[in-house]
Image (spheres, coloured by chain):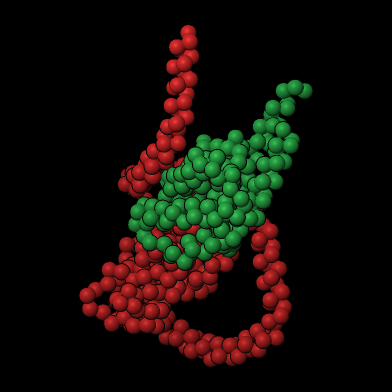
Chain colours: A red, B green
């Protein structure tokens, strides 16, 4: 009896001794498992993020109020200068309006001459950013609105300035948006007037870089970057940013929309969600 | 009501865990760089040394998994770091608990340095991308500077739970 108790005690001591090592080994196993990324894990991750979203929304309310109050105060202080600037801008826009009207008429006439087939009409939604999923290492955000509101993976997120990212995951009431700066983001783009085709690659920095460049190109600082429409995840011709710097062949892009305090995004369905369907989904269709 | 006492005790004892969970969720609030600093490391460090009964290895493991799931970081990354910090501090608790406040602060700063480096390298390995070191350095400095405040909170919480129990 004594020896059994003694053995049990010894076993307990041994377990206690190896317990930290076991937990660390499990954690290492989880890291490896995370790299394999089985579908079940993806599902669990999605559910966890969606479950946390309403809680984060409540927690972020005071921050939101504070931001709104500060923005309100700033707006009040800036009213006079802003008014002056807007008047000047309005005058210049009137000129542009006349040019646009003239070009619009010309465009319609040319279109009717060419028998042009217009693209499918896009549907847009506006969604509030609830949570910053990225934290330290990712650049993705949780937004209000999911499948129940008609928001599906593949929707393109934009702001008034330009492209923001795209919806990669949708739950019933919340969706996850991958920003262009995320390290997993890859966007086929064209650069400059000669439309050099390359890839905009996110690396979690504020300025993503251009990769997959042709051996000879004439990209220069200030060139405009636009979506190319290749792969089909984004339609062609959406404004992305401008070339901000070129260091030792590394080309960095200043995004048109790079506001870290973005509160709302416009989600546009260009009818490209089908591109994301899996083989089984296609078979079902 | 004899059965209700252990229940409330258990609730009180789970406050550090719940607070850590709240910190993880607060880190998710948009536009708040300060809240995304991993203050949870100070909590784990404190309780690993002074009262592991309130935040044990399993709790740290669970917190790590929850962090990875909610923050969408490479799975197992935070789990590994939390458990590593907990057991490093816990196995040296006799030595660490005898240190003065400023010495302990220095030890924490020193311990965080390799931990942040491991975080950086593991993330680079898992995600195949290099994250901005400036961001990490910013987090590290804020974490070290905020240490006295957070450790005070942990101490008071520990005392309060002890008094109540």
Residue B131 lies in what quarter of the image? bottom left
Whether residue A275 appears in this view of the structure is: no
Q: Residue at x 67, y 86 (%)?
A: A81
> What count of labels does the image hold?
0
- Residue A55 image point, x, y percent: 62, 49
Question: Looking at the image, is A261 positioned above or below residue B36?
Answer: below
Q: Residue at x 67, y 72 (%)?
A: A71
- Residue B50 image point, x, y percent: 60, 41
Whether residue B70 appears in this view of the structure is: yes
Q: Residue at x 63, y 45 (%)?
A: B19
- Residue A123 image point, x, y percent: 50, 62
Which of the pair A272/B58 is nearer the observer? B58
Q: Residue furthest top?
A: A1
Question: Looking at the image, is A103 positioned above or below residue A54?
Answer: below
Q: Residue at x 44, y 75 (%)?
A: A254
Q: Residue furthest left?
A: A215
Which of the pair B62/A275 is nearer the observer? B62
Residue B159 lies in what quarter of the image? top right
Question: Looking at the image, is A84 positioned above or below residue B148?
Answer: below
- Residue A210 image point, x, y percent: 34, 71
Residue B132 lies in what quarter of the image? bottom left
């Amino acid at each position: 009896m004594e020896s059994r108790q003694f053995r049990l005690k010894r076993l307990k001591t041994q377990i206690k001794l190896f317990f930290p090592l076991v937990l660390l080994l499990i954690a290492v196993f989880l890291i490896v498992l995370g790299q394999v990324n089985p579908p079940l894990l993806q599902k669990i991750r999605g559910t966890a993020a969606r479950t946390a979203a309403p809680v984060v929304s409540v927690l972020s309310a005071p921050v939101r109020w504070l931001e709104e109050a500060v923005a309100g105060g700033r707006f009040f202080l800036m009213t006079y200068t802003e008014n002056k600037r807007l008047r000047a801008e309005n005058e210049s826009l009137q000129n542009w309006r006349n040019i646009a009207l003239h070009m619009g008429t010309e465009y319609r006439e040319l279109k009717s001459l060419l028998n042009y087939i217009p693209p499918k009409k896009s549907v847009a939604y506006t969604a509030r950013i609830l949570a910053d999923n990225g934290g330290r290492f990712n650049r993705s955000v949780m937004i209000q609105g999911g499948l129940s509101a008609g928001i599906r993976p593949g929707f393109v997120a934009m702001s008034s300035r330009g492209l923001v990212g795209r919806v990669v995951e949708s739950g019933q009431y919340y969706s996850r948006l991958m920003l262009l700066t995320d390290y997993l983001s890859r966007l086929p783009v064209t650069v400059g007037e000669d439309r050099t085709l390359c890839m905009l690659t996110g690396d979690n920095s504020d300025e993503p870089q251009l990769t997959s460049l042709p051996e000879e190109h004439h990209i220069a600082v200030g060139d405009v970057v636009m979506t190319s429409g290749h792969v089909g995840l984004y339609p062609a011709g959406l404004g992305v940013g401008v070339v901000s710097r070129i260091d030792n062949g590394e080309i960095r892009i200043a995004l048109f929309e790079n506001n870290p305090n973005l509160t709302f995004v416009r989600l546009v369905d260009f009818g490209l969600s089908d591109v994301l369907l899996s083989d089984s989904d296609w078979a079902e269709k | 009501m004899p059965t209700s006492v252990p229940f409330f005790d258990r609730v009180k004892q789970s406050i550090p865990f719940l607070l850590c969970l709240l910190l993880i969720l607060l880190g998710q609030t948009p536009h708040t760089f300060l809240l995304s600093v991993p203050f949870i490391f100070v909590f784990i460090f404190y309780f690993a040394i002074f009262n592991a009964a309130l935040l044990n290895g399993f709790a740290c493991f669970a917190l790590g998994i929850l962090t990875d799931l909610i923050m969408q970081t490479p799975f197992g990354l935070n789990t590994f770091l939390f458990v590593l910090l907990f057991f490093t501090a816990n196995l040296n608790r006799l030595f660490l608990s005898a240190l003065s406040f400023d010495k302990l602060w220095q030890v924490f700063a020193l311990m965080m340095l390799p931990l942040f480096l491991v975080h950086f390298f593991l993330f680079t390995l898992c995600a195949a991308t290099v994250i901005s070191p400036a961001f990490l350095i910013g987090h590290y400095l804020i974490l070290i500077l905020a240490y006295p405040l957070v450790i005070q909170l942990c101490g008071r919480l520990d005392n309060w739970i002890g008094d109540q129990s």
